[in-house]
Image (cartoon, helix red, strand yellow):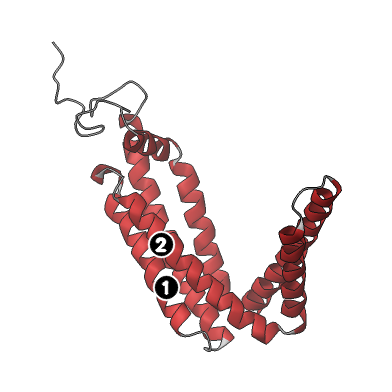
């Protein structure tokens, strides 16, 4: 007769993959390499930010401007297509116009764009950190819960600091970004290796820990 407690270390009382939590653990363990790749790219970006701060901030502003311009064009096209079908199109056209203005302003007024970009980066880091922290509570301790939680806390702290100091110099902001990316990348690598060590223990249909 099977031991009813044999799967508790992986899936809990509900059995293997009996809940969304178990599915998330298995998915992360199977794709540990993707987590590792994300960590490596974050570290490389952090190194580039330290070595080439002015180039990094200029590249970020340029990417933001291009994104706004492209997104604005697509929004206007979608609005025109909606108007041709007698559907609601006003908000789409308005959104496209705002995006085009933001993209043009980023190209013409890069210093102002840097402040806006800094604010957006702060909000993004805080929100993404909160999501990572929430996800950590759904991850089993053996799969690296504390690493994921620490990654979320690093993101939240980075976002608050960045949002509170938007007028800091571009070089300092880039160094902060580099420090954040490097720390975040190292934590993701640690998480990836922890997940890799658990990969063989979360195969579909297997509930017992080796």
Q: Residue at x 13, y 10 (%)?
A: 1
Numbered label attached to residue 57? none
> Residue 172, percent across and down?
51, 85
Residue 97 appearing in the image: yes
Q: Nearer the viewer, residue 82 or 159?
A: 82
* Residue positioned most to the top: 1
Residue 18, horizontal then vertical, whole percent: 30, 27
Q: Which of 22 and 41 is in front in this view?
A: 22
* Pointer 1 residue: 158
Left or right, 70 with respect to 57, comes to right
Taking depth in this image into account, of 42 and 132 the one nearest to the observer is 132
Please report the residue visible at 58 percent of the width from the left and 85 percent of the height from the top.
170
Disc 2: which residue = 129
What SS does tag 1 mark?
A: helix
**Disc 2, SS:** helix
Spatial CA span between label 1 and label 2: 9 Å
Residue 184: image location, x then y, percent = 43, 63
Q: Percent from the top left, x then y, of residue 180?
A: 45, 70
């Amino acid at each position: 007769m099977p031991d009813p407690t044999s799967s508790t270390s992986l899936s809990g009382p509900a059995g293997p993959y009996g809940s969304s939590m178990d599915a998330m653990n298995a998915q992360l363990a199977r794709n540990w390499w993707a987590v590792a790749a994300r960590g490596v790219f974050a570290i490389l970006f952090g190194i580039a930010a330290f070595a080439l701060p002015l180039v990094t901030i200029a590249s970020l502003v340029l990417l933001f401007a291009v994104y706004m311009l492209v997104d604005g064009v697509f929004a206007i096209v979608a609005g025109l297509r909606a108007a041709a079908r007698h559907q609601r199109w006003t908000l789409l056209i308005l959104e496209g116009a705002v995006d085009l203005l933001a993209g043009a302003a980023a190209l013409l007024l890069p210093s102002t764009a840097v402040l806006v970009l800094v604010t957006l980066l702060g909000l993004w880091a805080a929100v993404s950190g909160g999501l990572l922290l929430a996800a950590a509570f759904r991850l089993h301790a053996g799969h690296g819960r504390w690493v994921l939680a620490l990654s979320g806390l690093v993101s939240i702290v980075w976002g608050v600091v960045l949002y509170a100091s938007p007028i800091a110099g571009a070089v300092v902001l880039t160094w902060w970004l580099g420090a954040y990316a490097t720390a975040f990348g190292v934590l993701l690598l640690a998480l990836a290796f922890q997940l890799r060590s658990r990969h063989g223990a979360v195969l579909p249909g297997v509930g017992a820990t080796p």
